[in-house]
């Protein structure tokens, strides 16, 4: 099942640089793991912003919630979730 | 170059059913042609709405504008365009 | 899987009363059928508005979309869909 | 009498972890007590957010206010309250 | 139980003047009846707008919904309902 | 002359508890004094929020401004002021 | 007493030109009469819009409401009213 | 050339009182100087808010920008600028 | 003096095609005349929308208003005007 | 390819003055370098705000993102990016 997830990262001013760097490294590792399993199907940067647009492919809404909660940067994100389904005009069987 | 395009279709009440059906058929044909060429890379329906979320892969912003203007349902759409680029944590070379 | 669905009904002024009554009767029949099957789990009226707040229990987001599209009043609704999951503090196993 | 209550929790960055954990434990105990009495009838997590959608069944609006004020996390919540009533198409006598 | 109700009247352009006058007369009669019974406790005009701010005193949210639905101008109103309760600093026992 | 005033109180996290308690006590005393003189005609709590809806009866807009500025919690409030007048359908001479 | 009034004129498409011209002529006459009496103290056009920003000097909010209701274009206006008072740094005794 | 300028002052909580008092004194002196030269033509307080509505009469938009930047409280203001011109129904030659 | 002007064109559904074509032709002629005189300095299409972003170079705000009012499509536009001035970091003397 | 970029600078209160001055100097140097290469084609100040409106001419959306990320004040900016293309009525070949 596909969900569009938009993540807007808001780092508080004055955050310790080492702490932030560590968070970013762990976020990257986690994001790449989730991409390899196919759960985090697409990940794009929105131009000019510390923000991404993503497509997740999960078995349930609950699974998506657990994944998002597990992201190291989760406490610093504003997240919008939109349920998607296959478009009747799509020619891609996989864009279900 | 990738752009996220969100199209919200607003059909005026009282529109002639035959005219509308013809528009929808032509929209579908056009959408499928553009998917086959790879320009309209992804097309998803937003659940519960007459609205889609799409990813376009075009050579320029001008090309995207001409394509959107050519859609039969364009006069009845509210469209949001967001420029995307490759995310540094993406593992997909093609999600450029 | 549970989704919160908010439906705001906007009837165009001047709509034929018999047509509207027929739509409402068919909407009611459909809503009650869907409640009996357990898919439309809860249905409440928002006080002072021609609007409801509902909870749907479906197998997938695609199933929810098909159900909402099948509602006789769908063309006159503005719909918001929110994916829900079980709250860690919930004591109701069924509020999954 | 039923009210839909949406609670959006905003924890200030830098809050002491032990203080926060204690708040969360007490919030959970209080939420479960209120569910057992039937006052907090439903409690769902909104996917991807530190936010819930709830249904309260109270004797009056004043009772609801006192309950919400008593929640340990109340000072960190943005709350929306919506008065509900039985929908004429509902088949559930209890969704009054 | 007290509710603040804000009613914003939007008359469609081109509505038949006699029909509108009849609606307004019936709205006035109904509003005054409801004030006499004490249910519609306060009714003020918002300066410069075809809009009122009102306080209703009802036995339940459902009663309020039925009353609002019964107003002749209801189909032309956008309504906001806000649940109120006694303020701890109020000196008026009746502003419950 | 009547004005509707909505006061939304936003206490900064980490404010000294003794300072806050003192502010609240003084706010309450001031609010009750103003109610006794008839200037602060109505004061209701909005359910689920640290917010009130009030009706003030003042000789001029300038008088209202001076009163609001004099409230101990003024620096922590977001305030909306709406000018009211007698509604032509009101039966209460005093709701001028 | 001074009020800032912002009037945004929305003429429905397809309105009869003669009717509209007549409305505009009468609006102008009324606006100039009210300026001569000093009630409509200032009247400016907002650049690029069919909209004005005005300052009214009236004895009460009720008087302002009656004046605005009497404007020939009132049914086609969206109006915002803001209560003003003398600024402590103003050097103009008359900007009360 | 006339511009409407709305200044909303947001003082951060915890600002040193002496620093703030000094800023306010200097703001007042500057505002009165600019009123005397005729550049800051009108200055009103919005009732219930730490906010003003002003009319500036300047030779150019650049001159207005330099003036606003020079205000001691500028770093604590949210400012909206609206270009005005003479209204065709105005009887005041000077409200150009 | 420079102003940024954003024009969003909203053509009513069902407008006569010949009337619309005539309006568009006249709009184009007028736009090109104004570009040749240097008043309409830049004109860009916003991708995916019937909307432009423009820069005007005029002697006064009043001149800008007269020009915008003279556009054949003005009655069908929503317009936003923003006053600009030279940026201190600009290297273009002409971007005044 | 042209993009409109709007940058709203929000400096946190209490930021060290020397740090801020250094940031501003480096921002200015970077902005002027980018203007000299032609990438940052236009740069205007919005009157009354710490905000600019700019036009960038880049080879791709990704190039624009890298440039914006490289600005010294980027962490303190809210940025809006709008894709532009040549307007059919433009007479400037270069406003592509």
Image (cartoon, coloured by chain):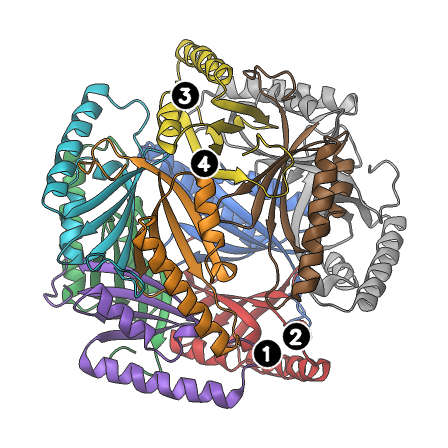
Chain colours: A green, B purple, C red, D blue, G brown, H yellow, I orange, J cyan
Q: Are marks 4 and 3 in contact (CB under 8 Å)?
A: no
Q: Are marks 4 and 2 on the same chain?
A: no
In the rendered image, the quadrant that contains the N terminus of chain G is: top right
Q: What residue sits 78% from the left and 42% below the top?
A: G66
Q: Are marks 2 and 1 in contact (CB under 8 Å)?
A: yes
Q: Secondary structure at mark 3?
A: loop
Q: Report in which chain the residue with disc 3 lies.
A: H
Between the residue at mark 1 and the residue at mark 4, the CA separation in whole angstroms equals: 49 Å
Between the residue at mark 2 and the residue at mark 1, the CA separation in whole angstroms equals: 7 Å
Q: Is residue D28 visible?
A: no
Mark whose residue sits in front, 2 or 3: 3
Q: Which residue is mark 2?
A: D89
Q: Report in which chain the residue with disc 4 lies.
A: H
Q: Which residue is mark 1?
A: C31
Q: Report in which chain the residue with disc 2 lies.
A: D
Between the residue at mark 1 and the residue at mark 3, the CA separation in whole angstroms equals: 58 Å
Q: Is residue I55 visible?
A: yes
Q: Residues within 10 Å of mark 4 (few under 14, many from 20)?
A: some
Q: Quadrant of residue I43?
A: bottom left
Between the residue at mark 2 and the residue at mark 3, the CA separation in whole angstroms equals: 58 Å
């Amino acid at each position: 099942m596909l969900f569009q997830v938009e993540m807007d990262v808001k780092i508080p001013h004055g955050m310790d640089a080492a702490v932030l760097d560590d968070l970013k490294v762990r976020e990257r590792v986690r994001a790449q793991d989730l991409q390899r399993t196919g759960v985090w199907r697409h990940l794009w940067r929105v131009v000019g912003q510390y923000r991404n647009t993503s497509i997740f492919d999960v078995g349930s809404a609950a699974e998506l919630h657990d994944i998002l909660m597990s992201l190291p940067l989760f406490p610093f994100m504003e997240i919008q979730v939109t349920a998607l389904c296959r478009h009747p005009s799509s020619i891609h069987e996989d864009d279900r």
